[in-house]
Image (cartoon, rainbow, N blue to C red):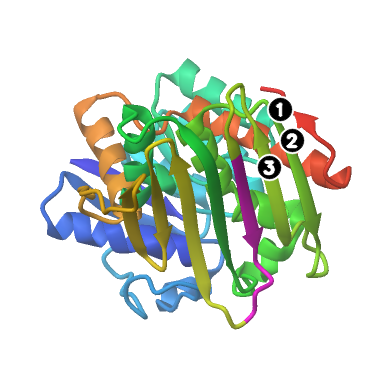
């Protein structure tokens, strides 16, 4: 039985909690034994967020409850911890847990910069423990379909890609940490990072980036942005992000054209067309991304297996791309080489 301690009960922590409840009900070899959050009010069971995800309230009585993650690790017999805390805490918490002999699943983004990521990677290596980052689009069925089509070449080479995600500002976070760029990295590192990772995963390492950004919310950074990516291949790829779209809710999409067709994902639906505009049949993997990524990590820990779809070194390189985007934004869109 894989025993888990969940650190962080904010909005994303609720999503993880919901999936542990589901996995246990389905009979998977996992048990959530303890939860931790610095905000003791979270144990009342009500958690806010911008997406519909699970129940409105939760009963935390089945779990040991902590406000100090180090105390939880010391007192509970755990196989891994699931870290769903503010970004600036990821590196320190991850390294500590790994050094205590635990495996770690850490929510995205991996850390605030590549140097912090390197410390996490080094800790995983010296302790011979698994580390995986919650870059969930690598498990999102519609994005996995795009990855498969790209890798297989069944529609030819990719020519053009456009990615977008956006919505209202995340004003529900504990002490408003998400809108504090020093703690979250701003919209670029917190929300746009999903598409940075998708672009990197699907098309390979960008060599340079050009980012134009605007800051709308005081204390935040790069709330609305547009990035173009350069590759060692003749392909045009861009990604836009905006978390100043009050009243919009939330949305994400991609449109990718290939030599022999087009793949479009928008309004929650994916379509594939050949070069003549005729529908192309496809099959989507069953299950939501948040569920599938945790299931994969549990399987790895339970079976002493290998992380296949989201190696931490790749998540570290995604942070390197994001850093180049931040630098380009400061330089009003100048092309910046990505330093891996």
Q: Which residue is mark 2?
A: 324
Q: Are there few (<14), some (14-19), or many (20+) residues within 10 Å of tag 2?
A: many
Label drawn at residue 7? none
Q: Residue at x 76, y 40 (%)?
A: 210
Q: In the image, is 319 to the left or to the right of 290?
A: right
Label 3: how many Cα within 10 Å (few below 14, some 14–19, many 20+): some
What kind of element bears circle 2? helix
- The residue located at (36%, 79%) in the rendering is 57
Q: Nearer the viewer, residue 51 or 124?
A: 51
Does the rendering let one see residue 75? Answer: no
- Which quadrant, please, contains the N terminus? top left
The residue positioned 25% from the left and 24% from the top of the image is 305
Q: As displayed, is residue 218 above or below residue 298?
A: below
What is the crowding at mark 1: few (fewer than 14 residues within 10 Å), some, or many (at least 20)?
some
Q: Position of residue 335 (x, y in %)?
A: 80, 34
Mark carried by residue 228? 3
Instruction: Kindly report the distance in space between the C-alpha atoms of the residues bearing marks 3 and 2.
Output: 12 Å
- Earlier in the chain: of badge 3 and badge 2, it is 3
In this figure, what is the number of numbered marks?
Answer: 3
Q: Which residue is mark 1?
A: 338
Mark 3 and mark 2 in contact? Answer it, CB < 8 Å. Answer: no
How far apart are labels 1 and 2 at the CA level?
A: 5 Å
Tell me which segment is drawn in magenta.
Answer: 237-246
Q: Residue 168: image x %, image y %? A: 62, 74
Distance from label 1 to label 3 (Cα)?
Answer: 13 Å
- Marks 1,2: beta carbons within 8 A: yes
Secondary structure of the residue carrying tag 1 is: loop
Magenta span dominant secondary structure = strand
Say which of marks 1 and 3 sits in front: 3
Up/down of 125 relative to 283, above or below: above
């Amino acid at each position: 039985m894989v025993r888990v301690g969940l650190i962080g009960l904010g909005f994303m922590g609720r999503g993880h909690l919901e999936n542990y409840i589901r996995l246990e009900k389905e009979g998977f070899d996992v048990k959530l034994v303890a939860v931790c959050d610095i905000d003791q009010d979270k144990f009342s069971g009500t958690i806010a967020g911008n997406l519909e995800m699970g129940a409105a309230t939760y009963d935390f009585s089945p779990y040991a409850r902590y406000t100090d993650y180090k105390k939880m690790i010391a007192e509970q017999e755990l196989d891994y911890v699931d870290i769903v805390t503010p970004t600036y805490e990821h590196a320190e918490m991850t390294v500590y847990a790994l050094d205590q002999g635990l495996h770690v699943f850490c929510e995205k983004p991996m850390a605030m910069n590549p140097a912090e990521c390197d410390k996490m990677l080094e800790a995983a290596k010296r302790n011979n423990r698994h580390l995986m980052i919650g870059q969930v689009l690598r498990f999102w069925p519609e994005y996995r379909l795009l990855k498969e089509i790209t890798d297989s070449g069944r529609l030819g080479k990719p020519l053009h890609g456009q990615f977008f995600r956006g919505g209202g500002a995340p004003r529900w976070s504990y002490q408003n940490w998400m809108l504090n760029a020093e703690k979250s990295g701003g919209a670029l590192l917190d929300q746009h990072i999903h598409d940075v990772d998708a672009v990197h995963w699907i098309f390979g390492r960008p060599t340079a980036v050009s980012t134009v950004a605007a800051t709308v919310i005081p204390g935040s950074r790069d709330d609305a942005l547009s990035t173009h990516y350069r590759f060692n291949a003749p392909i045009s790829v861009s990604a836009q992000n905006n978390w100043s779209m009050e009243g919009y809710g939330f949305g994400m999409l991609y449109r990718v054209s290939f030599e022999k067709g087009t793949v479009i994902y928008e309004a929650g639906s994916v379509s594939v067309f050949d070069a003549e505009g005729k529908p192309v049949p496809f099959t989507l993997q069953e299950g939501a991304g948040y569920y599938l990524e945790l299931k994969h990590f549990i399987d790895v820990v339970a079976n002493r297996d290998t992380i296949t779809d989201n190696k931490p070194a790749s998540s570290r390189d995604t942070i390197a791309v994001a850093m180049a985007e931040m630098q380009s934004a400061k330089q009003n869109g100048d092309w910046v080489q990505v330093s891996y």
